[in-house]
Amino acid sequence: MSIKRRRERERAERERLIVAAALRLAEAEGWDAVTTRRLAAEIEYSQPVLYSHFEGKGAITAAVAVRGCADLAAELGAAITAAGGDRRASLVALAETYTSFGWRRPALYDAMFTHLVDLPFATDEAPEPLRGAFGEMLRVVEPITAEGEDPGLLTETFWAALHGLVTLTRGGRLPEPAHERRLTLLIDHFAGSA
């Protein structure tokens, strides 16, 4: 292996360690606890090493968000595939998997969808994991799109509804016991008799 390839591999491994440490710390103590000083101590590298990989906490949070979108895309893809192509079952799988992800992984979800990060969403410049997660949602919503409707816009609307349910329920604004009923109402509205 060439020295250049070894250095590239080592650099990628350090970036992976930084992102993993940031997520671990956020999950344990919240995002306010994630500082470059704490991360440097966690991974046993100096702060200048962190800054050689990321411009600051915002860039680290963005990297966590990208990783989270890859995880979400994988979970959505598996659940949708398991639904077997049935439109309604696919919508249920999408809704249940998405909301479950938001509750099971709150620090990661917040990095992805509630913290201000310097990532392009809804553009061709969006990183592949972001496009992949949205693509899984689009795969389910597109078949129920009525003639003349924009499938991307309908998918964004369904996503926004799911995000609202996760955020409002996690924040205590909506009572959790009614979650399943809310999902059923949402799916009924979007799927109709699909």
Image (cartoon, rainbow, N blue to C red):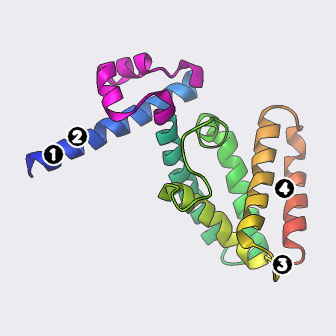
The answer to whether 2 is drawn above or below residue 58 in the figure is below
Measured as percent of width and height from the top left, residue 64 is found at: 50, 40
Tally of marks: 4
The quarter of the displayed image where residue 20 is located: top left
**Quadrant where the image shows the C terminus:** bottom right
Q: Which residue is mark 1?
A: 6
Q: Residue at x 56, y 50 (%)?
A: 120
Alpha carbon distance from label 2 to label 3 = 50 Å
Q: Are marks 3 and 4 in contact (CB under 8 Å)?
A: no
Left or right of 101? Residue 68 is: left
Q: Amino acid at mark 3?
A: Ala
Alpha carbon distance from label 4 to label 1 = 49 Å
Q: Is residue 126 magenta?
A: no
Q: Which residue is mark 3?
A: 194
Measured as percent of width and height from the top left, residue 170 is found at: 77, 35
The quarter of the displayed image where residue 37 is located: top left
In the rendering, which numbered label is found on residue 131? none
Describe the element under mark 3 as helix, strand or loop. Answer: loop
Left or right of 183? Residue 43 is: left
Q: Which residue is mark 2?
A: 10
Query: Of callouts 3 and 4, which one flags the residue occurring earlier in the amino acid sequence?
Result: 4
Q: Are marks 3 and 1 in contact (CB under 8 Å)?
A: no
Q: Amino acid at mark 1?
A: Arg
Describe the element under mark 2 as helix, strand or loop. Answer: helix
The answer to whether 35 is drawn above or below residue 68 in the figure is above
Judged from this view, the residue extending furthest toward the bottom is: 147
Dominant SS type (magenta): helix
The mark lying in front, picked from 3 and 1, is 1
In the rendering, which numbered label is found on residue 183? 4
